[in-house]
Image (cartoon, rainbow, N blue to C red):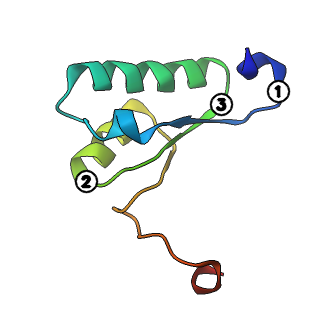
Amino acid sequence: SYLKRFDINYIKIDRSFVIDLPGDSEAKAITKMIVQLADTVAMEVVAEGVETEAQFAYLKAVGCSFFQGYLFGKPAPLPRIS
């Protein structure tokens, strides 16, 4: 109901699904379904916890738009990134 009630532009795929990609068929099905749902309702998708090239490649292939995780950089204090 939150997808309809609030002005939301992004859906985030939780790390708990991303961690098992691309080897786990259930994780693949769930993440693909989330991306398809987001596309249907004109939202962007953010995948969190992307740590490997294989995870990144799969998520990119199914249409995920944005990525967070150690593959791209470790957490840093605000002064270092601003």
Distance of mark 1 from mark 2, alpha carbons?
33 Å
Q: Is residue 16 left or right of residue 68?
A: left
Q: 10 and 2: which one is in front? A: 2
Label 3: state its secondary structure.
Answer: loop
Residue type at tag 2: Thr
| Mark 3 vs mark 1: in front | 1
Mark carried by residue 6: 1
Distance of mark 2 from mark 3, alpha carbons?
25 Å
Task: Tell me the quadrant of the picture where the N terminus can be found.
Answer: top right
Mark carried by residue 20: none
The quadrant where residue 57 appears = top left
Q: Which residue is mark 2?
A: 52
Whole-percent x, y for residue 9 in the image: 72, 36
Residue type at tag 1: Phe
Label 1: state its secondary structure.
Answer: loop
Label 2: state its secondary structure.
Answer: loop
Does label 3 or label 1 sit earlier along the sequence?
1
Residue type at tag 3: Met
Q: Is residue 61 above or below residue 6?
A: below
Q: Which residue is mark 3?
A: 43
Q: Is residue 64 left or right of residue 2?
A: left
The quadrant where residue 20 appears = top left
